[in-house]
């Protein structure tokens, strides 16, 4: 199937007619991303983050999901698909409200979102999505730079993101939405095999 894109706005309802295997993200009904497959380094970082979150959350109320899963940011269970104009596919999301977990998507804002930068998505992650995540009320947002091996953490404070810090390969990074949970970044940014 070949898709032709113009500048017309689309809805989630239209997107769902495209069929399986075609993924995109849209903000205000405009497509912002149809990325190529992630690099091995991107996948390795995601795998390690998912492992740490999965182990910590085992048996707890919250759930972690890796890409690709649609997150319909400003929606509720009652929202019709034709009224959804903002959906994203973050690299990792943590959802603590089970009512937001639908059979095929997340409905509403997750508690934590992690985006791993790539050259084609950097502006979206740092500007467009940052703004939408803030507006949606996502409590904690991490931006992972796989090339320089650091993570920026933003926490929602009075509906505005404040940068909590930048964490590097030798650091422990606290997950602020949970008590007593830190991630050792030396495990996340592992030395690549030669």
Image (tube, helix red, strand yellow):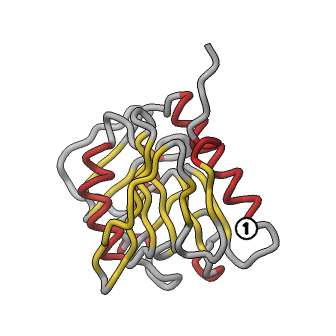
What residue occupies the far top of the structure in this picture?
Answer: 194
- Identify the residue position indicated by label 1 in the image: 57
Most foreground residue, 135 or 6: 135
Tell me the element at label 1: helix
Can you say whether 63 is above or below 75 in the image? above
What residue occupies the far right of the structure in this picture?
Answer: 59
Q: Residue at coordinates 31% horizontally, 71% vertically from top-left?
A: 162
- The quadrant of the rendering that contains the N terminus is top left
Residue 83: image location, x then y, percent: 35, 75
Q: Mark 1, residues whose alpha carbon is within 10 Å: few (<14), some, or many (≥20)?
A: some
The total number of labels drawn is 1
Q: Residue at coordinates 69% horizontally, 54% vertically from top-left?
A: 52
Can you say whether 75 is above or below 150 in the image? below
- The quadrant of the rendering that contains the C terminus is top right
Residue 100: image location, x then y, percent: 58, 78
The quadrant in which residue 46 appears is top right
Most foreground residue, 98 or 194: 194
Q: Residue at coordinates 31% horizontally, 72% vertically from top-left?
A: 161
Q: Quick check: 61 left or right of 175?
A: right
Q: Residue at coordinates 41% horizontally, 61% vertically from top-left?
A: 153
Most foreground residue, 50 or 145: 145
Residue 34: image location, x then y, percent: 37, 41
The quadrant in which residue 131 appears is bottom left
Q: Quick check: 48 left or right of 109?
A: right
The quadrant in which residue 122 appears is top left
Most foreground residue, 82 or 55: 55
Residue 174: image location, x then y, percent: 55, 65
């Amino acid at each position: 199937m070949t898709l032709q894109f113009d500048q017309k706005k689309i809805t989630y309802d239209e997107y769902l007619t495209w069929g399986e295997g075609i993924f995109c993200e849209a903000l205000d009904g405009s497509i912002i991303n149809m990325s190529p497959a992630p690099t091995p380094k991107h996948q390795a970082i995601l795998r390690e983050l998912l492992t740490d979150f999965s182990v910590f959350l085992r048996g707890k109320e919250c759930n972690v999901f890796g890409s690709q899963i649609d997150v319909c940011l400003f929606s509720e269970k009652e929202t019709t698909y034709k009224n959804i104009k903002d959906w994203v596919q973050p690299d990792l999301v943590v959802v603590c409200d089970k009512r937001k977990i639908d059979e095929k998507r997340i409905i509403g804002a997750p508690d934590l979102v992690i985006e791993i930068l790539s050259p084609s998505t950097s502006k979206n992650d740092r500007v467009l999505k940052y703004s939408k995540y803030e507006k949606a009320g996502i409590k904690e947002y991490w931006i992972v730079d796989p090339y320089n091996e650091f993570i920026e953490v933003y926490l929602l404070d009075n509906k505005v993101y404040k940068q909590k810090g930048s964490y590097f390969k030798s650091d422990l990074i606290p997950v602020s939405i949970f008590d007593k949970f830190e991630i050792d970044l030396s495990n996340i940014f592992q030395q690549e095999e030669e």
